[in-house]
Structures are given as C-alpha cells and as structure tokens.
Image (tube, helix red, strand yellow):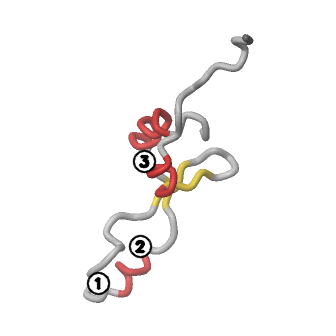
C-alpha cells in the first residue's frame, strides 16, 4: 500500500455551498442579512447586498480547515 497519497480530510459541503472560490483562490461570500425583510431597506442598502464580496481574512483562516481539499 502506497503512502504517497495522504488523506487530508473531508470537505465541509454545507460550508462550501455558501462560499465561492475564485480562480486565483480568493474566497467570496454573500453579504449578511439578504434573505428576508429586504423591502424596508433603502435602495442603496439593497444594492450593497447584491453579489458576492471578498471574505475577511479571519474567515479565510478558519475556512481552510473546513475546505481542506478545495483550497
């Protein structure tokens, strides 16, 4: 049995679905608070919630443990 291929652990799939990994390896996430109660927000606040944002460094550090085989 060859030991050259080491097992690094399983990827946390529920966390992976909430993140997007760019081609350069950056971690993108959805802004918080955009699931419901959005009608009362101003137009500017609604536009700020659109799309994905670059994840903060603290989250990236913790995410590497959850996304072992993807980053």
What's the residue at 31%, 82% (across, down)?
38
Where residue 52 appears, as percent x and y from the top left, is: 51, 64
Q: Residues within 10 Å of mark 2 (few under 14, many from 20)?
A: some
Callout 1: SS: loop
What's the residue at 41%, 43% (across, down)?
59
Where residue 50 appears, as percent x and y from the top left, is: 47, 74
Residue 55 higher or lower than 70, as above or below = below
What's the residue at 70%, 20% (across, down)?
5
Q: How far apart are marks 3 and 1 (CA)?
A: 24 Å
Q: Earlier along the polypeptide chain: callout 1 or callout 2?
A: 1
Q: In which quarter of the image is the N terminus?
A: top right
Callout 2: SS: loop
Res 41 label: 1
Callout 3: SS: loop
Residue topped by disc 3: 56
Q: Do the numbered discs 1 and 2 sit on residues whose CB atoms are within 8 Å?
A: yes
What's the residue at 46%, 38% (across, down)?
66
Residue topped by disc 2: 49
Residue 50 higher or lower than 55, as above or below = below
Q: Earlier along the polypeptide chain: callout 3 or callout 1?
A: 1
């Amino acid at each position: 049995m060859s030991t050259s291929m080491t097992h690094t652990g399983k990827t946390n799939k529920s966390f992976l679905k909430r993140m997007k990994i760019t081609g350069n390896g950056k971690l993108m996430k959805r802004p918080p608070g955009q699931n419901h109660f959005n009608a009362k927000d101003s137009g500017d606040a609604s536009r700020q919630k659109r799309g994905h944002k670059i994840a903060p460094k603290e989250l990236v550090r913790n995410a590497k443990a959850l996304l072992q085989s993807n980053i």
